Image: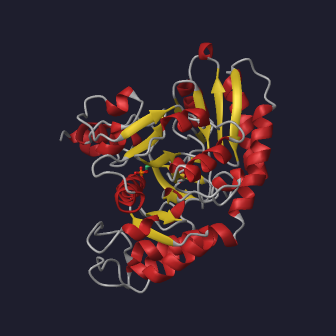
Amino acid sequence: MTATTLERPARSAADLIAREAHYGARNYKPLDVVLTRGEGVYVWDVDGKRYLDCLSAYSAVNQGHCHPRIVAAMTEQASRLTLTSRAFRNDQLPAFYEELCELTNSHMALPMNSGAEAVESALKTVRKWGYEIKGVPEGQAEIIVCSENFHGRTLAIVGFSSDEQTRGGFGPFAPGFRMIPFGDAAALEAAITPNTVGFLVEPIQGEAGVMIPPAGYFTRVRELCTQHNVVLILDEIQTGLGRTGKLLAEQHEGIEADLTLVGKALSGGFYPVSAVLSNSEVLGVLKPGDHGSTFGGNPLACAVARMALKVLVEEGMIENAERAGARLKGSLASIRHPAIKEVRGRGLMLAVELHPEAGGARPVCEDLMARGFLCKDTHDHTVRISPPLVLTADQADGISEAFEAALRR
Ligand SMILES: *Cc1c(COP(=O)(O)O)cnc(C)c1O
């Protein structure tokens, strides 16, 4: 290093960005803000500037950044016991199972780490269920998925993505998946065959730009899956745990999935914790040795997740998501500006879609960043707004005021 390099403050934003670009794989293009601290809905950058986080790490920090009760549970457990592997039992896992199943009205749970692992686990389990219980001939199981889906980044999952960048260059892919349009129950009915074992779907497609299916869609999906003995797998990794103003988004539709996938906010953003929840006997097909994970169900993850669920419920965050979300959606929808095409969403899972000629969502996000609000653009013309569920009414109003000001520029 030259003398001038050494004289630069070691942690300047420009320096950190340069090091990241030099040493890191370039699979992301983040906004150029380098964060160092978070508390509640706020995060601070290395220069001490405060921002309101309108992304919540894709709904992983529903409980707000660094929630003190989760910090306490995590540090207490971290100094006691972190990992035993499932070769031995630990005293946190049974309580985690019990609390998670009682809260979500599930019979059984399978603990994993990332969301993608929960999805993979569900796919493996429904195939096995198909062969052992439904009687599908070996090797013939079919799983139906939706176009514009997002279920994670593993090989099996990207193989059934409809997004060219997600799939491109990563083949060959696993067979046994069939794709239908999202929100089209007739297409599901037409795609089901005697070998169909599962239908994997998001209640609201988040990464696709917060796409809400037509009213009655999930009622019909539930009927079709029951009628044809197909396991309904709802990926609630983003919609679940309060984000849409209900514990699970399926509750808006008055249905129950057979398998429900949760992750992200299951740990309040502290640690990767995910789970497959089973409302029928599907998880029962797994026998010792069929599936596993070194870190899945570890005592640290369980202690963190137990507290993350507890604060979500005890501190009224789910109700607040509904209340603050309605207020924010209402004030965004009342902005009179020709760039706005649509404001949509449920609870605090919101998006503003701009007209294509408005110049794109990224410049709006950059303007919002300068004003102290961190939002994420998606699919060129849509800005997603999903702040932590502890958002106050004043903070909600602040977001829509900043959004309007950013559009007027
Ligand atoms: C984020 C997400 C996943 C993948 O979770 P990872 O923890 O990133 O593997 C899967 N499904 C949905 C709907 C998601 O939003």
Residue at (57, 38) in percent of width and height: 375
Q: State the residue lying farthest toward the top.
A: 357
Q: Is residue 45 left or right of residue 221?
A: left
Rendering coords of residue 197 (x, y %): 43, 50
Rendering coords of residue 269 (x, y %): 49, 60
* 345 vs 41: above or below: above
* 163 vs 269: above or below: above
Q: Image quadrant of residue 320?
A: bottom right
Residue at (71, 42) in percent of width and height: 216
- Colour scheme of the rendered structure: secondary structure
Indicate the quadrant containing the N terminus: top left, top right, bottom left or bottom right: top left
Residue at (75, 35) in percent of width and height: 332
Q: Nearer the viewer, residue 363 or 224?
A: 224
Q: Nearer the viewer, residue 13 or 386?
A: 386
Indicate the quadrant containing the C terminus: top left, top right, bottom left or bottom right: top right
Rendering coords of residue 268 (x, y %): 53, 63
Residue at (47, 77) in percent of width and height: 303
* 374 vs 61: above or below: above
Question: In this view of the protein, can residue 184 be seen by the observer?
Answer: no
Q: Is residue 123 left or right of residue 280?
A: left
Q: Nearer the viewer, residue 94 or 7?
A: 94
